[in-house]
Image: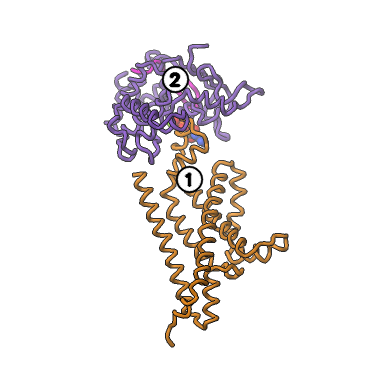
Chain colours: A orange, B purple
């Protein structure tokens, strides 16, 4: 038996729509996750000890349970508490929340990496808290948080494949459906793997560019 | 209005159960230099940090240029100042740290001009002009484009001094400004500070440079175990016979300056 990629690639438009859904959920979810994670880390840094301890709990729960279980609970369990979501929305929320827990830890480490004295110096010249975050903390932690952030983005991309199980029409779902219709499973999986890998390489490439820019800035 | 730039009254500071400052009363006259000496752990940094409001005194009051710092009233009536009031009082104070604390992602010029732009709202060119003059003042105009990592410790500390001076404080606080420096680099920083003192800046300097304290300080304060044992002219403090705790301190921290005084 020989491989026949033609039958898969003949379904170009369908595959493309799957890829587009994957990219939208991935990029949107990743941005939302990073923003949410940053907000959580910022609240923990400046909100006092109570807030810090309180926010640790949801982070531990999300990091301590499988993503698959989380999206099943959200999609199939949600209706029990009146939360009825369409698959794409559930998938987007799932990725955002899951990613946020990890991004929160990345930014927490980032905040801790900046010497207290740099913040005190900023306070002494009259910077407000927001200005300290914007002009001192974020730029100083940028180089440190970039590699784990790229890593996280890559993990999130691959986790989107699980969204096929809650019927999100992303590329794992569309391509494997084509594979089974055409009796070409293996070919479908190979195509799928190549597309994921290509997207991962794009993320890596963007990460390297950002890293180069940042290290030039902080010479 | 008094002639005092700083008046600390019954200032105490505790960290949890640890009492670090005990009922400190200290006045610093306008245009004068007070040097704070004492064994390590005696509370020098904590006192300076309370004046900079990086720490909050547990009790007591601090007046800066006649204005209360951080709190209004004392005892039961003690209440926090509004952020705007606090900012106004703090703007009179410039702080210089042992570890310089320059922002590593900004050039020397960026470090000095940042607050002029972001806090004072100056345009970029206005802020940089002014920052450049300030760098010139500490002899670092040529290094304006350098990042902290490209500067020696002495140069970094001079940039840090320029950064604080750029905002026109009336009081400058220094916490062991030369302790992190190689001995051959302390001179350039001390000479900038000497010049500043000669220009009439009010200064409080925590230092182990006894020679500097004796020659530049109008007053020398000796802290021991959180208590202010003296705050007097260098002649009065260093004159023999000395108080035993001070004698012991000078023996252990003996340096070139102290040897000079023997
Ligand atoms: N943030 C803090 N928490 C607890 N203890 C502290 C803190 N800062 C300083 N101390 C303690 O206060 C004492 C005085 O410290 P410090 O003011 O730094 O002394 P010095 O500057 O004279 O060496 C020390 O015993 C130190 O351990
Ligand atoms: Mg100290």
Task: Give the residue at mark 1.
Answer: A112
* Label 2, residues with CA under 10 Å away: few <14, some 14-19, many ≥20: some
Assess whether mark 2 and mark 1 are in contact (beta carbons under 8 angstroms).
no
Element marked by disc 2 = loop
Q: Quadrant of residue B158?
A: top left
Q: Is mark 2 within 8 Å of ligand 2?
A: no
**Toward the viewer: B207 or A55?**
A55
Asked whether residue B176 appears in the rendered view, the answer is no
Above or below B91: residue A179: below
Element marked by disc 1 = helix
Q: Is residue A219 left or right of residue B85?
A: left
Asked whether residue A29 appears in the rendered view, the answer is yes
The residue lying furthest to the bottom in this view is A1
Residue A70 belongs to the span the image colors magenta = no
**Toward the viewer: B127 or A127?**
B127
Q: Indicate the position of residue B72 as horizontal and vertical percent values.
A: 60, 22
Residue B226 belongs to the span the image colors magenta = yes
**Toward the viewer: B148 or B57?**
B148
Above or below A211: residue A162: below
Q: Quadrant of residue A219?
A: top left
Q: Is mark 1 within 8 Å of ligand 1?
A: no
User: Which residue does the image show at 52% across and 79% down from the upper left?
Assistant: A179
Q: Indicate the position of residue B133 as horizontal and vertical percent values.
A: 33, 25
Image: magenta residue range: B215-229
Q: Indicate the position of residue B99 as horizontal and vertical percent values.
A: 39, 35
Chain label for disc 2: B
Q: Indicate the position of residue B248 as horizontal and vertical percent values.
A: 39, 24
User: Which residue does the image show at 54% across and 61% down from the upper left?
Assistant: A25
Task: Give the residue at mark 2.
Answer: B170
Above or below A133: residue B32: above
Magenta stretch, main secondary structure, is strand
In the image, which disc is placed on residue A87? none
């Amino acid at each position: 038996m020989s491989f026949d990629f033609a039958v898969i690639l003949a379904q170009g438009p369908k595959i493309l729509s799957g890829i587009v859904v994957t990219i939208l959920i991935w990029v949107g979810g990743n941005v939302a996750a990073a923003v949410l994670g940053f907000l959580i880390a910022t609240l923990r840094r400046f909100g006092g000890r109570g807030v810090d301890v309180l926010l640790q709990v949801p982070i531990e729960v999300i990091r301590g349970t499988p993503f698959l279980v989380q999206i099943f609970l959200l999609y199939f369990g949600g209706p029990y508490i009146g939360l009825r979501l369409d698959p794409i929305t559930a998938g987007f929320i799932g990725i955002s929340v899951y990613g946020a827990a990890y991004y929160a830890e990345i930014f927490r480490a980032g905040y801790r990496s900046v010497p207290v004295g740099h913040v005190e110096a900023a306070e002494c010249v009259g910077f407000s808290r927001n200005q300290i975050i914007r002009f001192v903390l974020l730029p100083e932690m940028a180089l440190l948080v970039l590699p784990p952030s790229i890593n996280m983005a890559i993990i999130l991309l691959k986790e989107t494949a699980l969204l096929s199980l809650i019927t999100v029409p992303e590329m794992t779902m569309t391509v494997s459906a084509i594979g089974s219709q055409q009796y070409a499973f293996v070919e479908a999986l190979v195509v799928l793997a190549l597309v994921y890998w290509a997207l991962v390489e794009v993320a890596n490439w963007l990460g390297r560019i950002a890293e180069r820019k940042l290290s030039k800035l902080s010479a | 209005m008094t002639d005092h730039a700083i008046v600390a009254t019954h200032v105490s500071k505790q960290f949890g159960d640890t009492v670090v400052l005990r009922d400190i009363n200290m006045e610093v006259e306008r245009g004068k230099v007070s040097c704070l000496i004492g064994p390590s752990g005696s509370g020098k940094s904590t006192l300076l940090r309370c004046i900079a409001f990086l720490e909050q005194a547990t009790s007591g009051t601090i007046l800066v240029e006649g204005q209360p710092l951080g709190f209004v009233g004392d005892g039961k009536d003690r209440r926090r100042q509004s952020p705007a009031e606090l900012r106004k009082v703090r703007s009179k104070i410039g702080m210089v740290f042992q570890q310089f604390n320059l922002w590593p992602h900004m050039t020397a010029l960026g470090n000095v001009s940042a607050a002029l732009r972001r806090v004072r709202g100056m345009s970029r060119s206005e802020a940089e002009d002014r920052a450049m003059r300030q760098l010139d003042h500490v002899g670092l105009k040529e290094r304006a484009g350098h990042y902290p990592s490209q500067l020696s410790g002495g140069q970094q500390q001079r940039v840090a001094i320029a950064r604080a001076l750029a905002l026109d404080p009336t009081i400058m606080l220094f916490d062991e400004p030369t302790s992190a420096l190689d001995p051959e680099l302390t001179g350039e920083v001390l000479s900038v500070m000497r010049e500043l003192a000669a220009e009439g800046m009010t200064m409080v300097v925590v230092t182990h440079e006894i020679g500097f304290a004796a020659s530049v300080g109008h007053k020398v304060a000796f802290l021991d175990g959180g208590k202010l044992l003296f705050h007097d002219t260098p002649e009065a403090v260093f004159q023999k016979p000395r108080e035993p705790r001070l004698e012991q301190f000078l023996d252990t921290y003996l340096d070139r300056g102290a040897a000079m005084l023997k």
